[in-house]
Amino acid sequence: MTDRNLELFERAKRVIPGGVNSPVRAFKAVGGTPRFVQRAQGAYFWDADGKRYIDYIGSWGPMILGHGHPAVLEAVQKAALDGFSFGAPTEREVELAEAILALVPSMDMVRLVSSGTEAGMSAIRLARGATGRSKILKFEGCYHGHADALLVKAGSGLATFGNPTSAGVPPEVVQHTLVLEYNNIQQLEEAFALHGKELACVMIEPIAGNMNFVRASVPFIKRCSELCTEYGALFVFDEVMTGFRVAPGSAQQVYARSIPGFEPDMTVMGKVIGGGMPLAAFGGKRAVMEQLAPLGPVYQAGTLSGNPVATACGLATLAEISKPGFYEDLGRKTQSLISGLQAEADKAGIDFCGDSEGGMFGFFFFKELPQNYAKVMTTDNARFNTLFHGLLDRGVYIAPALYEAGFMSAAHTDADIAETVAAAGDVFKLL
Ligand SMILES: Cc1ncc(COP(=O)(O)O)c(CN[C@@H](CN)CCC(=O)O)c1O
């Protein structure tokens, strides 16, 4: 049987660097040939050889409804008939902005852009413009897109390449970026004591999906928020991955359950809000957001920002996830996957732990959940690679890098989950 994936990969590598348009897709961390997706439907995709996979990546988060949801497809087809892009305002981007703000009340206003990187980059510039300060603080293992100032010890992609920073980023650009250990309150206190008055913002992935799945502890989030308020820095929640993925009000709603009244100062979003089309956003309180052009001095722009077809896709997606019981059902399925995997690992006598929130999950070959990047980096890669390929051979597609989270969709059935758990049970015996 010809391996069309291999043929396509060889052809791709002749014209696209590494044969991919985003590094993690190249299977560099796990080896082997990337699967070229021919089509996708519901919880599945079929590769270039027509082989079916149960998809736990879902485009790295956007496909929370599953692929090809009829209501979303219809909305996109209808919008496309009215025009692809105008470079002028449309009612639909107002509707989407209103829908986002209704679900995430910490924001008074939101600006739509085309990617999470663009949203994160713009949020940093806005925080710097609004505070008049240059320094920013991020945490090891968190990835906020590939803007120069943020490409410092990112946990996604770069972690896989074992390269804590990227070539091409001038040292003077990252000299303003402080990088601390995730969940380390002592370091946080020290950094604020030293630099608090120079900090424009602290940016964090509240549940870090770029070092697989590591939760920020409640005390850590609380302390970040308190110190930002005390020193006048903005607390920026990067919810590109967790936004509408872990709860209807995103991760900030999860933390507000334990920290009464908690709100980040700004939120960065992406993935789910575009439903699989290029759409992301950043938002915050009115006083900060009105610093943005054309009102204020902080410039930010985009030809395809608020794209009329992408906003239709996003609106239709948000309409579906807003239906009663959506997150209860999604969370139940994700939990059943993790507990199924745990049971199989226990049977096979291997150290395993997993965690999930809403439709996002992760797991490790450890007895206990890691709390930071350094611990995650002690993972036995060979063991993960055996699991990855064992599952792939059995038609189950998880992230081709241990430093990535997994994603459940509303389209996954209990039968899909049972099939996944059985496949993992087979592979765990080989570890
Ligand atoms: C928390 C967080 N913030 C920002 C980004 C960047 O978003 P994009 O520019 O890729 O749309 C991401 C992107 N996530 C990766 C997956 N770990 C996208 C996959 C890829 O890079 O190909 C993110 O997870």
Image (cartoon, rainbow, N blue to C red):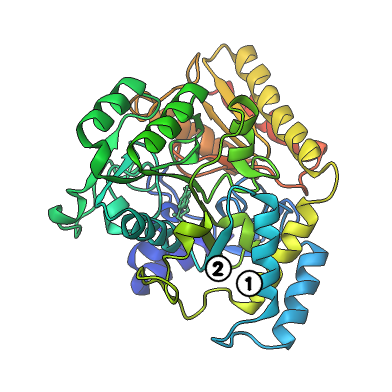
> Which label number is shown at residue 310?
1
Q: Is residue 215 visible?
A: yes
**Number of numbered markers:** 2
Ligand 1 closer than 8 Å to label 2 CB? yes
Q: Amino acid at mark 2?
A: Pro
Q: Is residue 51 visible?
A: no
Q: List x then y, in percent, for residue 204.
A: 43, 40
Q: Nearer the viewer, residue 71 or 182?
A: 182
Q: Is residue 134 above or below residue 405?
A: below
Image quarter for residue 277? bottom right
Ligand 1 closer than 8 Å to label 1 CB? no
Q: List x then y, in percent, for residue 154.
A: 34, 44
Q: Identify the residue at horizontal 35%, vertical 72% (top origin).
A: 14
Residue picked out by circle 2: 278
Q: Is residue 5 above or below residue 417?
A: below
- Say which element carries label 1: helix
Q: Nearer the viewer, residue 250 or 327?
A: 250
Q: Is residue 78 above or below residue 272?
A: below
Q: Identify the residue at horizontal 58%, vertical 27% (top origin).
A: 259
Q: CA distance from mark 1 to mark 2?
A: 6 Å
> Which label number is shown at residue 43?
none
- Disc 1, disc 2: CB below 8 Å? yes
Left or right of 189 on screen, residue 254: right
Q: Nearer the viewer, residue 212 or 419?
A: 212
